[in-house]
Amino acid sequence: HNDSGVAVANALAAVQEGVTMVQGTINGYGERCRNADLCSLIPNFQLKLGYDCIQNEQLVKLTQVSRSISEIVNLAPDDHAPFVGLSAFAHKGGIHVSAVEKNPLTYEHLEPEKIGNIRRIVISDQAGLSNVLAKAKTFGIELDRKNPACRQILEKLKDLESQGYQFEGAEASFELLMREALSQRQRWFEIKGFQVHCDKVGEDCTALATVKLSVNGTNILECAEGNGPVSALDAALRKALVNFYPAIAHFYLTDYKVRILDSGAGTGAKTRVLLESSNRQQRWTTVGVSTNILDASCQAVVEGLEYGLVLENHEAIPLVCRVH
C-alpha cells in the first residue's frame, strides 16, 4: 500500500535486501492512497537495478498497457506518471531542447523507447527555434532553420500565448497553426455561424445547437441536441459534416476543460477551453480562447474535427477562412 507515499521506494529497498516477491498494480490503482505502481517498479528493477522481471519485448509495451488499463477503468491517464506518463520525457525550454537534440542523456534518465514511451517537445512561450524545429519533425513537416516561416511561427506562438492561448497541452492546434504558416493547412469546411439555446424545464435541461456552414460552396444548416451546449454544438457540426466526411462519425469528445484567465474582469473575463478528442485509436487536444465561452468552445471543437480529418488523411477542400 502507498499510505505513506513510499510504496515503490519500499519495494525497491526490500528486493535489494532479499525479498523475492512484490505485489503491485498497474498505475498503482487501489483503495485509500493506492498501491505500489508496477509501471514504476518494473522499469526500475529491470533497467536501473539489473533484475530480470519481464522480456524486453514485453517491456516496450509498458506504456501501452498503462494507458489501456486507464481506458478500461475509465480514468484519465496520469500525464505526470514516472516512465509512462505523457510528460515523463517532455522538454520545454529552448536551450534544454537544443541539448536533448544533441544528446538525450543530458536531460533523460533512459531512452523512452525502452518502455514504449516517446520524447515530447513542448511548445510554450519559453520555446525557441529548436522547439519549433523539433515539433515540425514530430509532425512530419519539413522545416529548415533558415526558413523565414520558422521565425513567423515563433512570433505567432508568442503573440497567441499573450492573448491567453496555451499550446503546451494542445499540440493538435499548434500543428494546424504551423501548417497554416507554411500554407499547408487544408480547409474542409467554413463556419458561417452558430446558435446554442438551452431550455430548463423542471429538473431537465436540454441544449439545442444550430450551425450554418459551407462545404465546397454547398451551404448546410443543421441542428442537434446535447446534454450541454458544447455537446450539442459538437453533435450539430458532426451531423452537418458526416455525409461529406464519414470518418467524423467515429470522432468523439473525451475531455473538456475550462479556465478563466482574468477573473478580475468578472463576466467579461477571457476563457480558455482545452478540448480532447479521440477516434478510438488516437487522442488529440485543441484550444480556443474568447470572452465568450461558447465561441472558445467552438474554436476548439472545429479544430478538433479538422485535426481528426488530418489524421484520417481525408481529401480536403481548401478554403481561406478561420473561425473567430
Image (cartoon, rainbow, N blue to C red):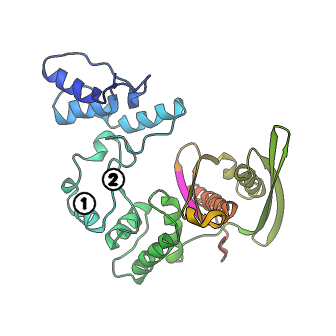
- Closer to us: 49 or 80: 80
Q: Is residue 20 left or right of residue 138?
A: left
Q: Which residues are magenta?
A: 284-288
Q: Residues within 10 Å of mark 1 (few under 14, many from 20)?
A: some
Looking at the rendered structure, the number of numbered marks drawn on it comes to 2
Quarter occupied by the C terminus = bottom right
Q: What SS does tag 2 mark?
A: loop
Tags 1 and 2 touching, CB below 8 Å: yes
| Whether residue 70 is situated above or below residue 158 in the rendered picture | above
Considering depth in this image, is 183 or 161 the residue closer to the camera? Answer: 161
Image: 129 above or below 25: below
> Residue 119: which numbered mark, if any?
2
Element type where label 1 sits in the image: helix
Q: Amino acid at mark 2?
A: Arg
17 drawn magenta:
no
Q: Nearer the viewer, residue 270 or 187?
A: 270
Is 256 in front, or is 319?
256
124 horizontally vs 220: left or right:
left
What secondary structure prevails in the magenta region?
strand
Q: Position of residue 67 (x, y in %)?
A: 45, 37
Instruction: From the top left corner, tell me how far across and down residue 168 is, in percent.
Output: 44, 59
